[in-house]
Amino acid sequence: MNRQDRQIELDHSSARTVFLATGLQSSGSTLVSWCFLQRPDMNGTLDGDTDLIPLPPADIQTPFIWYKTTISCFTLAEQIALLEDEGYQVKPALIVRDVRAVWMSLMKKNYGRNGVTAEDPPLRLRFRRFFRSWQDAVAQNIPVFRFEDLLVQPETSLKALCGSLGLPWRQEMLEWPKPVEQIADSRHGNARFMGSDKQGLQAALDPDVASPIGGQIHGEDLAWLEATFRDYNLSLDYPLHLQNLDLLPGRSLPSWEASRRLHWRLRQKPLRYIFCKLGLSSYQPRPQ
């Protein structure tokens, strides 16, 4: 794309409104995103790449653009600024969930990589970025949507969020008539949800998610979460302390082995990487 075409695209997008929804991975945001993408006046991205800047598809014809991503590499404020740099008007919303449930979920997910790189930052760094995003949302009156409210009052909670975003209510958000083929960008999303029948919101809700939080977590991580997110828990009516969890010793340590960059390098230059790890960095393969 040349500069003139790019400027035309920016001039066109300057009048467009992007509804940006973001939150931690495993916060239930895919389900919320699917509900909004069912609206006939909206299309966009079901789940953006967390390590790429948020840029909606260029060919959306609906009045409103939806972009949902997660907070890992970029905070809410950074995501808003990046979209504004492209000429969009941004209406953001922050999707929240009890962070202890999120942490325990990420421990079991392949994308819950407790890595050491920019694209796979340590879990604590991701959660700090989310906490800072929540503080910004409160200070700027950005809508904060509790995933737990969706589980117990789906229609009421979604109607309230639409009102906060200045959107009229659409019954399609509950009934889900739009197939995945009509979503402009549906490449990602929770694997379990994407493999379901999607017969409507009520049928998709998992009653086990609304049950009391349980599972395994390292003791030091639990203590850190409850201390760091004390104000968050108080503000959003989450319990200050959770009992009866299966506590593991110590904490979950970030590692290079959990990072995707390791696997990329192994695929690209496996011998060089192996010899470097063995302290033989000066090794050069013998010409054939």
Image: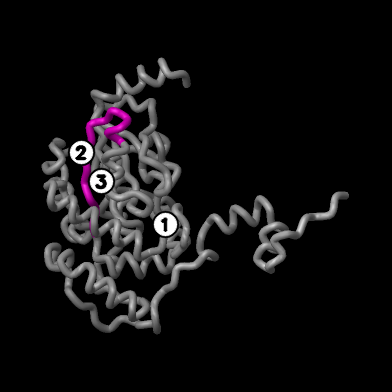
- Say whether residue 197 is left or right of residue 78: right
Which amino acid lies under the numbered mark 1 shown in the image of this protein?
Arg
Judge whether residue 93 is colored magenta. Answer: yes
Find the residue positioned furthest to the top.
4
Labels 2, 3: front one: 3
Q: Which residue is mark 1?
A: 192
- Say whether residue 11 is left or right of residue 1: left
Q: Is residue 151 above or below residue 178?
A: below
Q: Label 2, secondary structure: give it.
A: strand
Find the residue positioned furthest to the front.
282
Which is nearer the eye, 173 or 141? Answer: 141
Q: Which residue is mark 3?
A: 77
Which amino acid lies under the numbered mark 3 shown in the image of this protein?
Ala
Q: Position of residue 212 (x, y in %)?
A: 24, 74
Q: Which residue is mark 2?
A: 91
Circles 3 and 1 in contact, beta carbons < 8 Å: no
Q: Position of residue 103 (x, y in %)?
A: 34, 67
Which is nearer the eye, 218 or 68? Answer: 218
Find the residue positioned furthest to the right.
288
Residue in the picture at 25% in, 46% down: 77
Q: Position of residue 109 (x, y in %)?
A: 44, 63
Res 41 visible? no
